[in-house]
Amino acid sequence: MKCTKTPLIAVVLLSAFLFTACKDDENAPTEKSGEVSWIMDNGISISGQPIATDDIVIIEQGSVLIAVDGKSGETVWQFQGLKNGEGDPTISHRAPLINDDIVYWAMAWGNVYAIDINSGEQIWKYEASIDFMETGMNHESFMVPPVYHNGMLYVVGYSGKLIAIDTSTGQLDWENRVWCSPGSEILWNVDKIIVVNRCDWHYSVVAFDDATGNKVWDYEASNQLSFYLLSDVNFVYIKEGVNIKGLDISTGAMAYELNTGFTEGRLQLASSKYFFMAKDDKLSAFDKKSKQEVWTYSIKRNLAFRPTLKDGHLFVGDTEYLHVLDAESGALIWEKQLHKYSNNTGGIIELISHAYTPAVNDEYVYVVHKDKLFALKR
């Protein structure tokens, strides 16, 4: 065997370099889970929940839609929507929709916009028509996030219209006004658009053919119906009274039932395995197959809005904290207090703010709290 001699001084210098490099890497600052990376606070009321891609966060501030760099918090672009003449829209708890680098924004004051997510330039605008004598409204109002499927955008107007817009042109494809006042949810499932209808405290779940707008079926419900709709390939899920019910997607007939034991409380989310239900300051998980409650997590403040489920984790915002839970066990992974509600003596004062449904990507959690947009490390 032939060995090559290496000068001792070279070995010493190389060893010193490697030690220094490793030491620098070990000491390099890293963000911890729950650590605040940046805060957007421009003093303007945030009127909708955020939505995020890997790079961009979209937020609504009144009649302005703002795109923010997800890593730095710097504003990328702003888009001015329709103003109502009396100031900007009030809080509506809705979010835009992102599909194939296009942002679809259904405003509170009657316009629907398609906006290029990279440039902030308008692609098209749809202006909803409305009959004042019929509705008593000067303009249509969109208070529910839109739904996209196969080149069509579906929006629900406060007047009771279900509207289908061709996303290639921004033109009306069809509309149907057959109810009094829509609920706070719209979804697509197996060639049907499904909404909640409320008429003089009479509730129903209604399914429409997505191609024609014709009614396919409706389910007559009591006034104890939860507005949130959830679905899988077989059922549309609702909570009515104490029961979570699964409506057959083809017929609307009830084909599944789970007794939660809670008359109050709202069905918030569903995974392939669990239902997640919120009541006051508790979030509970029910197994869909066994129909048993499997865990309950106590929230520090009342659960304000719908949690977000991503990668087996639940991101839950209340009026003071952001909680991150393991969806399987309900165990707390981490939490962050976003604002302290206390007076000079340390007591709790009236809760005057709320946390919207968080937006989550692979690196960050984005949550609105007290008119600020927080970016927290996942």
Image (cartoon, rainbow, N blue to C red):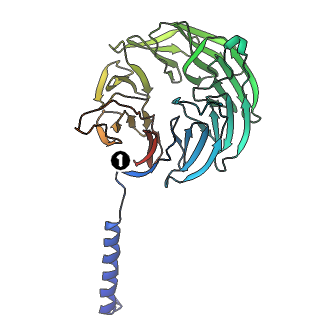
Give the vertical position of 357 relative to 216 (above or below).
Answer: below
Toward the viewer: 97 or 216? 97
Q: From where the camera sits, is residue 45 visible?
A: yes
Q: From where the camera sits, is residue 100 visible?
A: no
Q: Residue at x 62, y 30 (%)?
A: 86
Amino acid tagged 1 = Gly
Label 1 sits on a secondary structure element that is loop
The residue identified by callout 1 is: 34
Q: Answer left or right for 83 relative to 274.
A: right
Q: Answer left or right for 226 relative to 82.
A: left
| Figure label count | 1
Q: Residue at x 63, y 11 (%)?
A: 179
Q: Position of residue 300 (x, y in %)?
A: 29, 32
Q: Position of residue 219 (x, y in %)?
A: 55, 8
Q: Quadrant for residue 182, please give it.
A: top right
Q: Position of residue 15 (x, y in %)?
A: 31, 82
Q: Answer left or right for 171 relative to 296.
A: right
Toward the viewer: 313 or 198? 198
Give the vertical position of 256 relative to 75 (above or below).
Answer: above
Q: Quadrant of the N terminus?
A: bottom left
